[in-house]
Image (cartoon, rainbow, N blue to C red):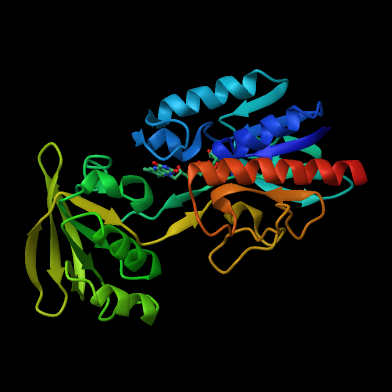
Amino acid sequence: PFDVLVVGGGPAGASAAIYAARKGIRTGVVAERFGGQIMDTLGIENFIGTKYTEGPKLAASLEEHVKEYDVDVMNLQRAKSLQRKELIEVELENGAVLKSKSVILSTGARWRNVGVPGEAEFKNKGVAYCPHCDGPLFEGKDVAVIGGGNSGIEAAIDLAGIVKHVTVIEFGAELRADSVLQERLYSLPNVKVIKNAQTTEITGTDKVNGLTYLDRETEQEHHIELQGIFVQIGLVPNTDWLGDTVERTRTGEIVVDNHGATNVPGVFAAGDCTNNPYKQIIISMGSGANASLGAFDYLIRN
Ligand code: FAD
């Protein structure tokens, strides 16, 4: 059996694996797609200490770093269930069962898509999901935020300080964000909110030039000219496969304490799949290291 089995091979999982392997204990990583979300990321400008890199390049260096150590990397394998028996057992889609004394869950998350024509085509060409990451790219430009929940309104407030103008597109009749956020938003001079608006298309040529929406009251279609669109309609953790075995929040995030421990002894979690409030590469790496040290601490006591 493994001492530490890491499920997920993104920044959190890579970091957890390196920290475990450096303790000289038997370490494995099982990943559906090594690299995780950064494989879909073009420019990265907030990975501290590196002014600029690109997702696939960072993923390759994560892989190279992990492979410096004696880590059993099982790529292109998806975990489908976890059970706590004498050891912790992780069953894979292919039927194999991996046993380990401790497990670190780092299966990440995915942004919910609006699913309209143009979204996939213009991803990284004006369509963005992370205001902390890509906000500065739109300095002085007109952007829209799709989604009027807390994350959408936080993004709009954040972006309003950087870009020329922000249009918030809300599907429902009212914004769903907390009222303090709404008050802050409405106090800003360069923001407009459009409610009852269903985005029907993201338009562009080689990059985004606008957005078409249907006014759900009048049933009329409108087009606005924009250079950027931030989609903020939810981040979904990849944790469905855990069912009730590990405590999760209402939105599916794995609940961890400050050692990265879950409610199941020996099972730890890190990165975007947890209830850590902020989802970033550097934060995921830090929480992977933290969970790995937590797991090591657990192993020497049990
Ligand atoms: P992930 O990167 O999501 O990795 C999860 C891993 O788990 C993957 O290997 C996946 O294949 C695997 N997995 C999932 N389910 C299973 C399963 N059942 N069995 C086995 N393996 C599984 N952050 C920044 O800091 N700066 C940026 O500029 C930036 N830009 C971004 C741009 C885009 C387009 C996106 C989508 C995200 C961006 N982010 C950025 C966010 C950043 O990518 C994430 O915060 C970070 O990747 C989270 O790391 P993670 O290891 O927790 O999860």
- Tell me the quadrant of the picture where the N terminus can be found: top right
Q: Position of residue 64 (x, y in %)?
A: 57, 19
**Residue at the image point whose x is 52% and y is 42% from the top:** 282
Name the image quarter holding residue 219: bottom left
Which of the two residues, 24 or 169, is positioned nearer the viewer here? 24
Quick check: can you spot residue 5?
yes
Is 68 placed above or below 289 here?
above
Outermost residue on the right side: it is 302
Q: Nearer the viewer, residue 222 or 20?
A: 20
Residue drawn where x is 83% and y is 44% of the image: 297
Q: How many marks?
A: 0
Left or right of residue 34, residue 149 in this image: left
Would you place residue 216 above or below residue 152 in this image? below
Q: Position of residue 202 (x, y in %)?
A: 17, 52
Q: Residue at x 33, y 61 (%)?
A: 155
Q: Is residue 107 left or right of residue 245?
A: left
- Can you see residue 116? no
Relative image position of residue 69 (x, y in whole percent) = 70, 20
User: Where residue 6 appears, x then y in whole percent?
Assistant: 68, 38
Above-or-below relation of 156 to 57: below
Which one is nearer the viewer's eye here, 259 or 234? 259
* Residue occupying image coordinates x 28% and y 63%: 156
